[in-house]
Image: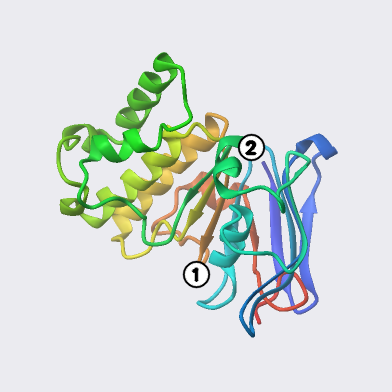
Amino acid sequence: MDDRRQTTDHGPQTTDHRPQTTDDVVLSVQDLHVSYGVIRALKGISFEVRRGEIVTLIGANGAGKSTTLRAISRLVPIQQGSILFEGVDLRAIPPHEVTAMGISHVPEGRGIFANLTVQENLKLATWGRKDPKEIQQAYERVFSLFPRLAERRNQLAGTLSGGEQQMLAVGRALMRGGRLMLLDEPSMGLAPVLVREIFDVLREINAAGTTILLVEQNAPGAETCPPGLRSGDRHHRPGGHVPGTDG
């Protein structure tokens, strides 16, 4: 996949020689505006995520990256604009139904239950799933991708290391069985070797069919990011009234 996005003062520029169809678009965000009281967090960001991509939103603190993910998950109200997931308008859909539609969200700070075990955290993520065989397969997949979680399945989540807690957060998202995964700064606070390990697993998850939208303050660096993540996927910079610029 050779799809590079470069940001200039005039907005994003895309070079993409692949044939594109409407069916390729999993997520479409258009002219999105979100405010917290009098504070305008998003001022008209627009972007699309196509099936099978890993797309990164890049920007400094306050640029609106986390707000964008929260708006997609319907955790914050939208003032203006549209969010379409597989052609369905999400604006009137409550968060639990968004999850059931196939969107999983790994929030900033991981959002695990510290007083529950690894196994209990994963089990909570299976609500709404009825097929015991599919649930068992989900456990096996998580423990295959993250062997350390298998070793610590009976350990309280609050006693895990930062890297292990991030693995658990991603594992919970996998337990939901979604087709689109949103990740809010998965590298935050982690040593470079653990960042690379997390990104290696994200590439495996993506290769297995899950589309990924993640946010980071900076583009993953050469010392931490696997080659596939550096070379294949697109970057957006949210913020300001022109999509693709910080502001």
Residue in the image at 39% along x and 20% along y: 137
Residue in the image at 70% along x and 59% along y: 5
Residue in the image at 77% along x and 72% along y: 11
Three-letter residue code for mark 1: Gln
Q: Position of residue 236 (x, y in %)?
A: 66, 63
Q: Position of residue 244 (x, y in %)?
A: 71, 70
Q: Position of residue 49 (x, y in %)?
A: 69, 48
**Quadrant into which the N terminus falls:** top right
Q: What label sits on residue 217 in the rendered view?
A: 1
Camera-side residue of 152 and 101:
101
Camera-side residue of 191 and 17:
191
Q: For the residue labelled by badge 2, is the local secondary structure a helix, a strand or a loop?
A: loop
Q: Is residue 147 visible?
A: yes
The residue labelled by disc 2 is 52
Q: For the residue labelled by badge 1, is the local secondary structure a helix, a strand or a loop?
A: loop
Three-letter residue code for mark 2: Gly
